[in-house]
Image (tube, coloured by chain):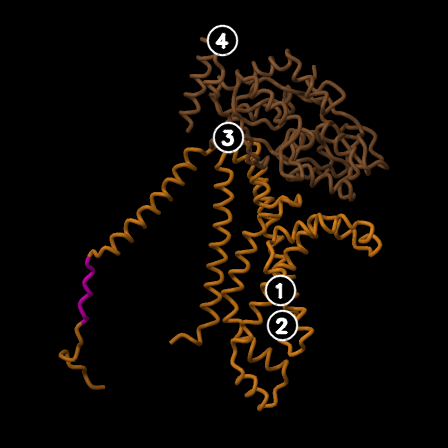
Chain colours: A brown, B orange
Amino acid sequence: MKTTTRLALALSAAALVLTVGASHAQDRMKIRIGTEGAYPPFNNLTSAGQLEGFDIDIARALCEEMNAECEFITQDWDGIIPALQAGKFDAIIASMSITPERSEQVDFSKKYYNTPPAIAAPKDTDITGVTKEALAGKTVGAQGATTHFNFSEATYTDSDIRAYPTAQEYQLDLANGRLDAVNDDVVVLSEWLATPDGECCKIVGTITPVEEIHGPGAGIAVRKGETELADRFSQAIDAIRANGKYQAINEKYFDFDVYGG
Amino acid sequence: MSEIAPASVVEKPPAPPRPWTGERIAGAVLLGLWLLCGIGLVAYLVAAWKPELFQRYLPYYLSGLGVTLTLVGLSIVFGALLSVPIAWMRLSQNRVLGGLAYVYVYFFRGTPLIAQTFLIYYGLGSFRPELQALGLWTFFREAWYCAILAFTLNTAAYQAEILRGAIESVSRGQWEAASALGLSKLQTLWKIVLPQAMIVALRPYGNEIILMIKGSAIVAIITVYDLMGETRRAYSRTFDFQTYIWAAIIYLAIVELLRNIVDWIERRITVHLKR
């Protein structure tokens, strides 16, 4: 399977160079894309069980640009990198931040968006900032195995940091008062705060990303060594940013530029 | 006394022949395969040995192990206490009491522990105003207490059934004989029935503790970082599969230790049954 994918990849890349897109239909490659499906508004499942979100729309646009046939596979966040390595899918498009730790295991495309992390807390909170001192003695939640959890553990050393399996669980615990604050992407938090369930809480402030922990933004992960595929994704990202598709998807979900500086 | 004539010495019978049957060969091959797997595992661990990984995560593993053992220990003890009235209700002639206990056992044995834990922590967590009015929120606020409650309720159901089965395994005649001798019901239970029932119950109790040790690995979903939770944390940082192998070895060691303890107790309490 692996070799056939590689072969198809090499062939289609060669074909692309040779024919300069003269006969796309013949060499449609197949890419299986892994995503989490529990991280709205980037990727989540509708009540009907369909995937939707910014990551999903971007993935579809990239596949169209690369003239590839894409299939989505949902996978728990904890096991998403091992599943990629085991060949369950060929790429991860799931708002995965490009970090040094992950870069040792997988190869990344260039970033396709970058939004800052933030702290959310109940509306009547006495937390006034996002510094270590402001959160001292507080209970802070984050999704486990994320840059946000790693950042919280490294930064808020005077706080009690709790790891949750997905964003939904820490949201429940912030709403019912078990948590004093949560740390996640500002867009994910804002999306939740805008729903009736998020009425309890507000954004206290955004955090300046730390390069070593947060990385340059979210990228598309492929198996180590499959740099051709990563490069094709990077080229496709440039292409959809140039032809306006990216901006259209951006506008569908957000009223600001998620690509970041 | 009289000398034993040398002629009366009985010759030791010759050892029975042990031909290499198909079964024996298959057995040896299988054993060899297992040995190879074991050697492979050890070789892998030696090859993958990273002192800095060990140094960094050993304290996490130890704290996780402590959490697992404390959680299971407390739950088993509280569960044992709770199982006594439930077993008594199950054994009672009263239909209402029997029915209540039956439903309790039916529910907790029939649903997964992970669902029970999730319901108690996140499910009850959404009834905060009601729990606060009852003064129970300080209890349910803490993931640790919720975990102990969930595990206690679950193991109590299993332990009640073990206890009931063991008591029922002692024949009716023992009760009648004790009654004929003028012993009260409680005396009969304590002095006659339970000592015999406990021999029957020992193995299932050992199994239940082992199942709880392994079952407790799900507790990380409610943010309690037990051995498995710490393993997942270490894995999410290193992406190194040996983190899971270490966890498996630790769980295996606990279970093996428990098995030996149960064996030892059984040998002690069944001395009078050995011929």
Q: What element carries label 1?
A: helix
Reading the image, the residue beneath label 1 is B105
Q: Which of marks 4 and 3 is nearer the N terminus?
A: 4
Q: How far apart are marks 3 and 2 (CA)?
A: 52 Å
Q: Choose the circle earlier in sequence order: 1 or 2.
A: 2
Chain of the residue displaying label 3: A
Instruction: Name the amino acid, label 2.
Output: Arg
Dot 1: chain letter:
B
Residue, disc 3: A89
Q: Quadrant location of the N terminus of chain B? A: bottom left
Q: What whole-number distance in Å separates the C-alpha atoms at marks 1 and 4?
A: 69 Å
Residue A193: x, y in percent? 78, 33
Same chain for mark 3 and mark 1? The answer is no
Marks 3 and 2: which is nearer the front? 3
Residue at position x 60%, y 67% in the image: B160
Q: Distance between the residues labelled 2 and 4?
A: 79 Å
| Badge 1 amino acid | Val
Q: What secondary structure is marked by label 2?
A: helix
How far across and down, in percent of the image, does residue A223 sit? 49, 25
Q: Name the residue under label 4.
A: A20
Q: Which label sits on residue B90? A: 2
Q: Do the residues labelled 3 and 2 touch (CB within 8 Å)?
A: no
Query: Residue B198, relative to residue B4: is it above or below?
Result: above
Q: Residue at x 71, y 26 (%)?
A: A117
Write the residue at 51% across / 60% down. B207
- For badge 3, the amino acid type reads Phe
Element type at mark 4 = loop
Q: Which amino acid does label 4 sit on?
A: Val
Spot occupied by residue A235 in the image (x, y as percentages of width and height): 56, 14
| Magenta-tinted stretch | B12-19
